[in-house]
Image (tube, helix red, strand yellow):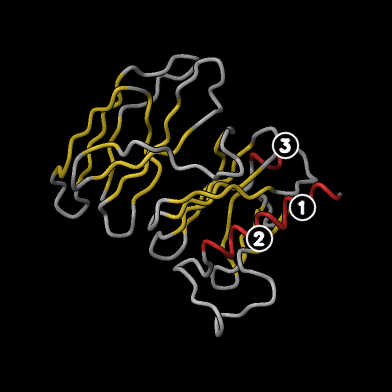
Amino acid sequence: MLVVAEAPNGGSILRSVSRLAVVDARTLRTRARIALPGDFSFDAFSPDGRTLYLVQHTSTRDLQRYRVRAYDLVQKQLLPDAIVDRTEPNMRGYPLARTSSSGGAWVYTLYEGDEPFVHALDTVHGRAICLDLTWHASQIVLWRSHLALRDSGGRLAVVDRNGKTRAILNLRPAGRTTTTTTWAAAGLSGVGLAATALLLRRRRRQN
């Protein structure tokens, strides 16, 4: 499927109404037309195509603050609750790069914010986890980097434009293997990812 949407206004102006169309990529037939009050942009699809994930901006004073929302394409309605990491409820940043697991069960977005981080979206269960990123290079390098999954989805690398790995996030719980743990499509479980994120935050504070 494809999503066709109006271009954002840019600057400090938020759209009062956002319009999107979901199109079948094979037949180019429009499957759904969506009009939502507020400023929304496309984020991701669930693997079964039943849920559309959107990024919502609500503040003209802080355009980096965002919320992820889910739109039910079957019931044709925006679900009421925002999808947030409970340990990082005030998500803010500017998206720079993205990659997803095989099948799209997990979508990873690199953000520049107060500190760089990766927003991990579980598109199957509608969950989000923010992973702190230890970054020692300049912000210019961050803006010119991309994300790459490695080790069958077990690690996420931030790679600069010259191919140098600048940071690595371990997406698997330490001390476990796929023989003892049932992994999601990206090679991780929600519990494991949350534990890894917590470990990363603790290490960062200690440093």
Specify few, some or many for label 1: CA neighbours under 10 Å numbering under 14, 14-19, or 20 or more.
few
| Marks 2 and 1, the one that precedes in the sequence | 2
**Above or below: residue 133 compared with residue 183:** above
Specify few, some or many for label 2: CA neighbours under 10 Å numbering under 14, 14-19, or 20 or more.
some
**Above or below: residue 83 compared with residue 46:** above
Q: Residue shown at 60%/57% (left/top)?
A: 194
Label 2 and label 3: CA atoms lie apart by: 25 Å
Of 175 and 2, which appears nearest the observer?
175
Q: Quadrant of residue 3?
A: top left
**Residue bearing mark 2:** 196
Q: Position of residue 171 (x, y in %)?
A: 61, 64
Label 3 and label 1: CA atoms lie apart by: 23 Å
Are discs 3 and 1 less than 8 Å apart at CB?
no
What's the residue type where badge 3 is placed? Gln
**Above or below: residue 141 compared with residue 153:** above
Q: Is label 3 in a helix, a strand or a loop? A: helix
What's the residue type where badge 1 is placed? Arg
| Marks 3 and 1, the one that precedes in the sequence | 3
Query: Is 137 left, or right, of 34 in this rendering?
Result: right
Are discs 2 and 1 less than 8 Å apart at CB?
no
Label 2 and label 1: CA atoms lie apart by: 10 Å
**Residue bearing mark 3:** 139
Q: Residue shown at 60%/40% (left/top)?
A: 88
**Residue bearing mark 1:** 202
Q: Position of residue 139 (x, y in %)?
A: 72, 36
Q: Nearer the viewer, mark 2 or mark 3?
A: 2
Q: Position of residue 186 (x, y in %)?
A: 49, 66
